[in-house]
Image: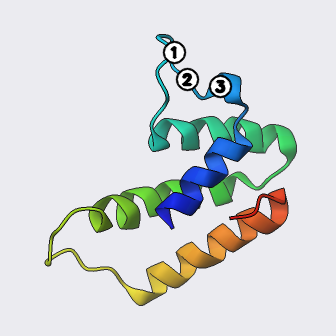
Amino acid sequence: MRKATECFVHEYVPARNQYDRNFKPLDLSSLIGKSRAVARINGLPVSLIQDLDLMRTHIFNPGSHYDVYTPIFQNDLKRAIETLEQVSTLTNINL
């Protein structure tokens, strides 16, 4: 799911906006932030982008580190998949 989100922001945000002032690639958090502005311009519900950011902080980041005590709930995973499917459908970006 994290890779699908990364794919989405790289496809959705124009390439010229994917770098910082020093021409270093932006991280996922920054790219999600940039995609909010693009979503407003394109009419994509900004709430979907906000959901991607919540997924990043609550599922992707904790899930990428070994910690047996960090719970990941089935409903959160289902919602993440549904959000990514909506984003893919509304933007015609194949995730």
Question: Label 3, label 1: how many angstroms apart (C-alpha)?
Answer: 10 Å
Q: Measured from the top left, where is residue 62 in percent x and y?
A: 28, 63
Image quadrant containing the C terminus: bottom right
Q: How far apart are marks 1 and 2 (CA)?
A: 5 Å
Question: Which element carries disc 3, helix, strand or loop?
Answer: helix
Are the residues tagged 3 and 2 within 8 Å (C-beta)? yes
Report which residue position mark 1 lands on.
Answer: 23
Q: Which amino acid does label 1 sit on?
A: Phe
Q: Is mark 2 on a helix, strand or loop?
A: loop
Q: Helix or strand or loop: what does disc 1 sit on? A: loop
Question: Which callout, 3 or 1, points to the residue nearer the camera?
Answer: 1
Rendering quarter of residue 71: bottom left
Q: As drawn, which residue projects farthest toward the top? A: 22
Answer with mark 3 or mark 1, whichever residue precedes in sequence. Answer: 3
Residue 36 place in picture, x, y as percent: 66, 42
The residue type indicated by label 2 comes to: Tyr
Of residues 7 and 82, the one nearer the viewer is 7
Q: Give the CA separation, mark 3 to mark 2.
A: 6 Å
Disc sitting over residue 19 in the figure: 2
Q: Where is residue 54? Give x, y as percent.
A: 47, 59
Q: Do the residues labelled 1 and 2 touch (CB within 8 Å)?
A: yes
Q: Which residue is drawn at the image coordinates 69% and 29% (left, top)?
A: 15
User: Disc 3 residue type?
Assistant: Asn
Instruction: Residue 38: give its label.
Output: none
